[in-house]
Image (tube, rainbow, N blue to C red):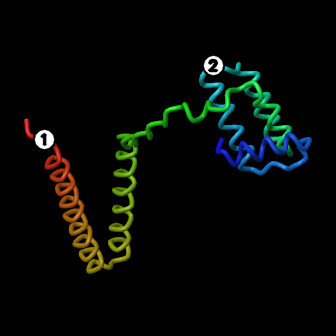
Amino acid sequence: MTAKREHDTAAATARGGSLRASHADREHVLDLLKAAFVQGRLAKDEFDTRVGQTLASRTYAELAVLTADIPAGLIRAQSPRQPARARPAHPENKVVNTCACATLALFVLSAPLLTGHFELFFVLVAAMIGALFAAAGQTAHSSYKKRAGRPRQ
């Protein structure tokens, strides 16, 4: 808790706790309860009960009661979390996307053939071949950039 917030909480408790707590005050108490739970200072059922009471609390006095038996410097002592790494896309997604694109291409190419617009068919084939070359170039460039960033062995 910051010095100002500690002062505000102490002042509210001294006045009988009639000052209303804000969302940020409740969030701070929730963070403190989470830290206490992770460190084993609270059991799961006690943690759940206090979280519910925190969300229902309206005044500083109600919040102060919920954290009275937890050390004040608990959150500051916690080490910051490491950010989670992004996971690569699943290979199944690539297969599904490839099949969907192939099916769409077949529908697009079959429409002009069925209606007798052969010129449109050849224009679409040329456009798709161009798109394939562009995709292959993009893939090759991406692969090159990944290899260039690795140290040589």
Q: Residues within 10 Å of mark 1 (few under 14, many from 20)?
A: few
Q: For the point 34% across and 61% down, which residue is it?
A: 106
Q: Is residue 98 visible?
A: yes
Q: Residue placed at 81% from the left, 48% from the top? A: 21
Instruction: Name the foreground residue: 42 vs 115.
Output: 42
* Kind of residue sitting beneath label 1: Pro
Q: Amino acid at mark 2?
A: Gly
**Place of residue 103 in the rendered image (x, y in percent of width and height, measured from the top left):** 38, 57
- To which quarter of the image does residue 89 belong? top left
Residue 92 seen in this snapshot: no
Coordinates of residue 35 in the picture (x, y in percent): 62, 30
Q: CA distance from mark 2 to mark 1?
A: 43 Å
What is the secondary structure assignment of the residue under circle 2? loop
The secondary structure type at the circle numbered 1 is loop
**What residue does disc 2 label?**
40
Q: Quadrant of residue 59?
A: top right
Residue 62 drawn above or below residue 68: below
Q: Alpha-carbon neighbours of circle 2 within 10 Å: few (<14), some, or many (≥20)?
A: few
In the displayed structure image, the side of residue 144 where residue 96 appears, left or right: right
Residue tagged by mark 1?
151
Residue 94 at x, y = what percent? 35, 47
